[in-house]
């Protein structure tokens, strides 16, 4: 199996790499932390895994294209692509700071399309392959204090929905994973209790099973999947009343420059 994964150095991305990194597989690992990538590759290679390591920022279109070209040269194609890299930040909209929003959008949206789009003609020629974008349960409805994050994840859902229809009949499948909260170094630092928190091995099993089934838009765990229908249908006045509101400090403190990460995982690289 030939698999290309972004945000591969920790959390969900690392878990995917270890899951698909089995004997005979060719795995492409892309992230910003070269030393962590090399360490993971060193652990996988003795198992008979052919590993390509690519240091790049997913928001850099040219750099990601070079990495993809190198991986395809190594693997001869691709069977599975997982656009996992992303960042989860609190909004700083009330400060008037557009920089943090731009950074988040570049990583979460452009970073995903930088990863997915170059593989489309490759898989179309093969007449097979699966393209996966890791979105979030937050992509189903805009959340107070998470306007940019929710919008970026909703963009992924819409993009992959349209891409799937575009590719219908080609043998290539496009799908979206929408995880809720997963126990990782990032969520372990949460100041409040996280609802329906999943252990990483359980989340990995659900997501890899969904990939194998070629789901369309898969929200996990099941409680989040049920809740999304309530969120989507709730009138705004009711949603405002019960949705968590950001603390004053969250609204007023400027968010630092985004560092790539996958939501529900730790900050990347």
Image: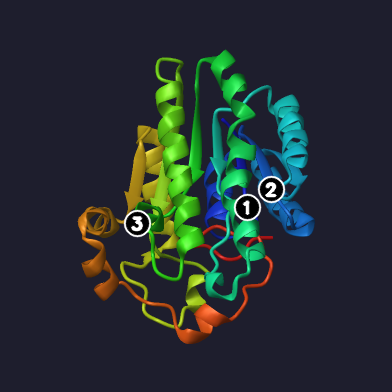
C-alpha separation, residue under disc 3 versus residue under disc 2: 24 Å
In the displayed structure image, the side of residue 149 where residue 43 appears, left or right? right
Circle 2: element type: loop
Residue under pointer 1: 107
Mark count: 3
| Residue 198 placement: quadrant | bottom left
Residue 74 x/y as whole percent: 74, 28
Name the residue beneath numbered marker 2: 59
Residue 242, compared with residue 226, is above or below; it is below
- Is residue 258 something that shows in the picture? no
Rendered residue at 21%/60% (across/down):
234
Please identify the quadrant where the C terminus is shown. bottom right
Q: Dots 1 and 2: beta carbons under 8 Å?
A: yes
Q: Earlier in the sequence, mark 3 or mark 2?
A: 2
Q: How far apart are the two marked residues, 1 and 2, measured between alpha carbons?
A: 5 Å
Q: Observer-nearest residue: 113 or 126?
A: 113
Q: Image quarter for residue 201?
A: bottom left
């Amino acid at each position: 199996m030939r698999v290309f994964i972004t945000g591969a150095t920790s959390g969900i991305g690392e878990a995917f790499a270890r899951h698909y990194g089995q004997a005979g597989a060719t795995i492409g690992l892309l992230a910003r932390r070269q030393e962590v990538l090399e360490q993971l590759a060193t652990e996988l290679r003795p198992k008979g895994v052919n590993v390509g390591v690519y240091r790049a920022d997913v928001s850099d279109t040219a750099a990601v294209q070079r990495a993809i070209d190198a991986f395809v040269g190594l693997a001869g194609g691709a069977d599975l692509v997982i656009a996992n890299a992303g960042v989860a930040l609190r909004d700083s909209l009330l400060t008037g700071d557009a920089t943090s929003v731009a950074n988040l959008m570049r990583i979460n949206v452009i970073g995903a399309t930088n990863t997915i789009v170059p593989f489309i003609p490759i898989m179309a020629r093969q007449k097979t392959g699966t393209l996966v974008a890791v979105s979030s349960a937050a992509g189903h409805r805009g959340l107070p204090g998470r306007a940019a994050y929710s919008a970026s994840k909703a963009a992924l859902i819409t993009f992959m929905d349209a891409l799937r229809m575009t590719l219908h009949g080609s043998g290539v499948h496009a799908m979206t994973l929408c995880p809720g909260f997963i126990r990782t170094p990032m969520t372990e630092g949460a100041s409040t209790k996280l609802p329906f928190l999943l252990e990483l091995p359980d989340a990995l099993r659900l997501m890899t099973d969904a990939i194998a089934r070629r789901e369309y838009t898969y929200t996990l765990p099941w409680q989040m999947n049920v809740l999304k229908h309530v969120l989507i249908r709730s009138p705004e006045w009711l949603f405002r009343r019960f949705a968590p509101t950001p603390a004053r400090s969250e609204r007023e403190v400027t968010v630092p420059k985004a560092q790539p990460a996958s939501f529900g995982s730790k900050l990347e690289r």
